[in-house]
Amino acid sequence: MSSKRFSFKILSKEKNARSGIINTSRGKINTPTFMPVGTKATVKGAFIKDVINTGSQVILSNTYHLMIRPGVDRIKKAGGLHKFMNCKLPILTDSGGYQVMSLSKLNKIDKEKGAIFNSHIDGKKYILGPEESIKIQKNLDSDILMVMDECPKKSNDYNKIKKSMELSMNWAYRSKEAFGKSKKKALFGIVQGGLFNNLRIKSINELKKIGFDGYAIGGLAVGETQKEMFNVLDNLVNNMPSDKPRYLMGVGTPGDILGAVKRGVDMFDCVMPTRSGRTGLAFTWKGKLNIRNSKYKYDNKPLSLYKNNLGLKNYSRNYLNHLFNTNEMLGSMLLTLHNINFYQELMSSIRKNIEQGTFNKFHDKYIKIL
């Protein structure tokens, strides 16, 4: 294992778009980067070795789900999350705040205690506060930890979003205190404030006072339009530290990623490539493709001209159509891997174009196609 400290360096810029490198103790991450989501210590439908072979350099796992099943003690006794799931890549763990909002039918927010909620599995009562969230992430031995925040649903209620943002800032301070100091691990703050630009600016200013290794943008991808999301980024990103990674949480479509990179974002995660792969939707350079469509019954071409040796080129659209229309699990596995691979091809092309000073042309060519 490398002894490198966590660090970030910008290598190239084209206006606001930037390419760089994050160093972690478990390896480097070229940015802009996309993190496949391994919610429950698995990227659904894919072997981790295949995920690595797509060019993925970091994955995301979920504190909430791992806390409930199998439990953090079980993972800690197995040697940590990397050993538990046989993953050598760096792992970022989110704090669990979003899942408290999205999955629990009954939750109560207590400023001091944290989120009090019932498990979506068996109804068992849990209390997840900033200190506990950081403790869990440390016991998982993740490389990048996220502060505990409250992620409210989309709302036009200014006072409600303001109160939620202020609570998240309180929890961010407590998360930093619980994290302490680390040369190898990183802690990211999370900007909240909904669609209100003044609240977003207040949030990032508070986070900068606390001081973090990276800064995430939360509370988006919750039902707003792409235009609304880009408006938030236009008003926020230039107020974020330029020497720290910027992470847009839970985003998104290839078009979302292109637009966010143009505005200066470095890191992304989303379940879209894997979830879409399980339902027969493929991402390609010519747009989305529904492999269940009858027009692919006699199409013996592969889905793409693959640049790496994943073996995907050996499976035709005809065959994939058959697998999905007969509910064979291999279809979901192959299309999941295809989609992860496409996202990594996209990120590689984004980095290359930033370095060559041609990103804006690349963006304009693909923003409406993808």
Image (spheres, rainbow, N blue to C red):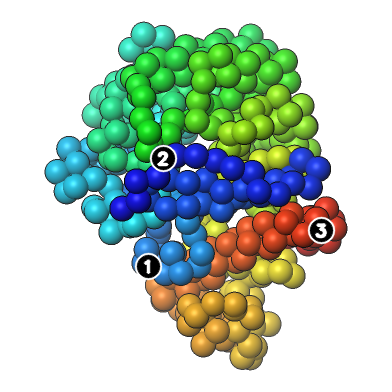
Q: Nearer the viewer, residue 155 or 183?
A: 183
Above or below: residue 35 compared with residue 234: below
Secondary structure category for the residue under label 3: loop
Residue depicted at x 43% and y 64%: 52
Q: Nearer the viewer, residue 8 or 55?
A: 8
Estimate the x, y position of residue 359 in percent, counting from the top left: 78, 55
The first of marks 2 and 3 along the sequence is 2
Residue depicted at x 37% and y 38%: 184
The dot on residue 49 is 1
Estimate the x, y position of residue 282 in percent, counting from the top left: 60, 68
Above or below: residue 70 compared with residue 196: below
Depth check, mark 2 against mark 3: the one in front is 2
Instruction: Tell me the kind of residue under disc 1.
Output: Lys
Give the residue furthest to the front.
Answer: 3
| Mark 1 crowdedness (10 Å alpha carbons): few <14, some 14-19, many ≥20 | few
Tell me the distance, in whole angstroms, between the alpha carbons under discs 2 and 1.
25 Å
Residue 345 appears in which quarter of the rendering?
bottom right
Say whether marks 3 and 1 touch (CB < 8 Å).
Answer: no
Tell me the distance, in whole angstroms, between the alpha carbons under discs 2 and 3.
32 Å
The first of marks 2 and 1 along the sequence is 2
